[in-house]
Image: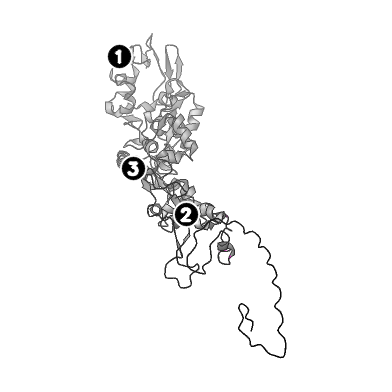
Amino acid sequence: MIVTAGAQPKAATSSAPAKAAPAPVPAKAAPPAKAEPVRPAPTKPGAPVLTPTTCVNGGCHQTMGTGKFVHGPVAVKACTACHTPKKDLAHPSKDKKDESDFDFPESGAQLCYACHDKKNTMPVVHGPIQWGQCSFCHDPHQSDNPYRLREARVDALCYKCHKQDKATKKEVHGPVAIGQCTSCHDPHQGQAKYRLVAQGNTLCLGCHLERKEEFETRKFSHKPARENCGACHDPHTEDNPARTRKPVPELCFSCHQDKQEHIAKAKTQHDAYKIDKKCLNCHDPHTANQPKQLKAVAKDLCLKCHDRELDTPTGKIMNIKALLEDNPVIHGPIRQGDCPACHNPHGTDNFRILKRYYPPQFYTPFAQDQYALCFGCHGPNLALERQTTTLTNFRNGDKNLHFVHVNRPDKGRTCRACHETHASKRPKQIREAVPFGRWEVPTNYEKNDSGGKCAPGCHVPRGYDRATPIVNR
């Protein structure tokens, strides 16, 4: 009986002679094995040895490494850089008692920090980083998104933890609108609150370069804008233009409470702060080359509205721009571009928002306070002294004709009876015609080197001469 390896014994028969066993064939030499990197091997008998190719090509993780953005160790198939097979446990284990078949060289973020710089060294650290959960935001293997983010849009990732209220109102900040939270916030850590990538206005001016140039080149800047853009603007979303935290003028009144009270109490109010951009019709909220943050010289601002006839509760206001263009002799404050010398643009208790009282009538009994506006620049002695040789050229000899016309207990002529308050074609803004109800009374004024004469409807022709007094009827 012959027993061959791996065969069962079989009884021999006497009918056939036994054949001789074939000669052994020499075995071919096996090809040299390819060198494999040394990997920790499981000790359980029969468990596969993990190599860089078996994870991907063994029929389990075939899609690993196929994403647009692949983690470095995955790209080079160095799976065991992060995953260490557990001892005495085959992978994949069929009777898995543990959460994983693998151990990690380090836990949490410490595993990432074995290769990556630490992201928890600054005063303000993002929650997931604090908890060591880098994989909250990043896929540790691969993703179709840059940085292997778990979402295509950054904000979709942020809103998994943060309340989704940053783009819910009418006005949305550009970076927020396109989901680029990281334009302003560092996703890992920062030196100050909210992990902003820059502090204070430096952050805003990093994009708003036109504002940066204005701050550097203009003479005046608004204190809140200079110190903190966020004092007026919400950085994410608001219902107001430019995402202001409150509508204008309510926003302005948050600081300028004195102006709010002044406007509320004024009997004559200016419509400029009620229409269109309200306070911003005249004031630039950031920078300006004019005091009070005015957008331009006051006169130029005023004429943007006063370039047409306007209806008001107290009557029509003429087209001031046309008046100034047609009349070369212009009142001093207007020549200097200073309309607020006479008018308070926020409102007053006086006719035409005048800063001080100025009689709107043709006639008025004389009192010094009746002419408070004019006497603010022109001394009151102009109408208080009967005789003078210095106060005015409107005199007959030394007889002060301002006193004659104005200083009367009953029917004193007001300044407006003879003078245009804005501009005229005649010297000293003398009127072409005097308003007397619906009648425009012509002045017929003529000036000469030492005096002049007029022949208005209010009296017979009369003249005056400073050197040789004229005897009038």
Q: Secondary structure at mark 2?
A: helix
User: From mark 1 to mark 3, how far is it between C-alphas?
Assistant: 51 Å
The reply to whether the magenta stretch includes residue 64 is: yes
90 to 7, vertically: above or below: above
Residue linked to disc 2 = 155
Q: How many marks?
A: 3
User: Quarter-wise, where is residue 336 in the image?
Assistant: top left
* Region rendered in magenta: 58-68
The circle drawn on residue 387 is: 1
Q: Secondary structure at mark 1?
A: loop
**Which one is nearer the viewer's eye here, 357 or 348?**
348
99 to 191, vertically: above or below: below
**Kind of residue at disc 3:** Phe
The reply to whether residue 390 is visible in this rendering is: yes
Q: Position of residue 244 (x, y in %)?
A: 41, 46
Magenta stretch, main secondary structure, is loop
Query: How crowded is the residue under tag 2: few (<14 C-alpha within 10 Å), some, or many (20+)?
Result: many
Residue linked to disc 3 = 253
